Image (tube, helix red, strand yellow):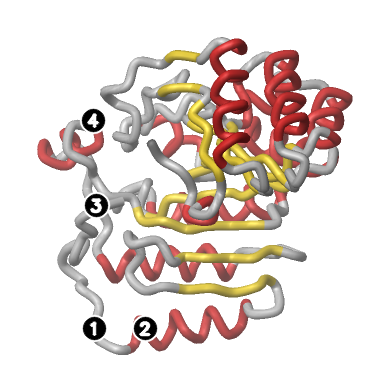
Amino acid sequence: MFRPPAEADSLILQVDQGCPYNRCTFCGMYRRVPYRRQTLPAIQLMIAAEARRAPDTRRVFLADGDVMRRPFDELQAILLLLNKHFPALARVNLYATGGAIQSKSDAELQSLRELKLHTLYLGLESGDEATLQAVRKGETAAGMIEGGRRAQANGLRVSVMILLGLGGKIRSQEHARATAIALNAMQPRLLSALRVVPVPGTELQADVTAGRFLPVTERQTVEELRLMVQGLTLTNTVFRANHSSNVIPLEARLPRDQARLLAQLDRLLASGHLDAESPGEQPLWL
């Protein structure tokens, strides 16, 4: 089971298993997990059991991938059950795709928010359409931007994830610039940057092995991030790059800390400590 770092203290309810799309070339999260939606009666039993165990629960995360893809009436029913069984409930968070958000009307999004749906974790990955097509993301940048904008316009908070190095050496600059443009259009409240790591068993790993995908070096990863940060015109966003895949942990509030963040990246680039020949040390876990 996977969950965002911020959900470490949340009650995690696995209402779905796997991912309904599960074809991104870089993602190995649910590769061996057949997608299955739990039935509402099964979810009701699960929630009732957890309520007996932890009746004071305030935060819930609904797993697995893209729970937002469920029909509105099912999401509404799940949220009603959570509100009924957890009197102290403050927020419910989940993974969402742009297409899943777009499948809901404004009235439906508002209704879900009133039932304490709070944060949608959206994997933008890149704002570069060519990169998204190459990794078989299954969504367009324009569609994800519109989904994020609509969610926020209807009271939901969107936490966006982007993947440094996803365009490889060939499209590194295009990936950085287009991603900054997409983020500016979306204006997410939360932004996380991770570094793409070829996971064994994925098509991306096979492409790296065959020489079809040229990973950026450790230094190019930082250059890509700097170019992206330089192009941002965000008005109220918390930015984090503290995942184990990142070269160094970073945190900032934008736009307030943008100059400081750029200076920090400049010092890192000038330090001579970055590997300019290879991706450098890769994390043992993701």
Sequence-wise first label, 4 or 3 = 4
Query: Three-letter amino acid code at disc 1?
Result: His
* Circle on res. 268: 2
Q: Quadrant of residue 204?
A: top left
Circle 2: residue type: Leu
Secondary structure found at label 1: loop
Residue 163 seen in the current view: yes
**What distance separates the C-alpha of mark 3 from that of mark 1?**
19 Å
Q: Residue at x 44, y 79 (%)?
A: 265
Residue that numbered label 3 is attached to:
215
Badge 3 amino acid: Pro
Tell me how far mark 2 sits from mark 3, CA to CA: 20 Å
| Of the image marks 1 and 2, the number of the one nearer the N terminus | 2
From the viewer's perspective, is residue 203 above or below residue 208? above
Which of marks 3 and 2 precedes in the sequence?
3
Which numbered disc, 4 or 3, marks the residue closer to the eye? 4
The residue positioned 78% from the left and 44% from the top of the image is: 152
Residue 218 lies in quadrant: bottom left
Helix, strand or loop for disc 4: helix
Residue placed at 34% from the left, 28% from the top? 30
Disc nearer the start of the sequence (4/2): 4
Q: Which residue is mark 1?
A: 273
On-image quarter of the N terminus: top left
Residue 178 visible, this orientation? no
- Type of amino acid under label 4: Glu
Decide: few, some or many residues near mark 2? Use Cα within 10 Å; few <14, some 14-19, many ≥20: some
| Mark before the other along the chain sequence, 4 or 1 | 4
Identify the secondary structure beneath mark 3: loop
Q: CA distance from mark 4 to mark 3?
A: 14 Å
Residue assigned mark 4: 203
N-terminal label among 3 and 1: 3
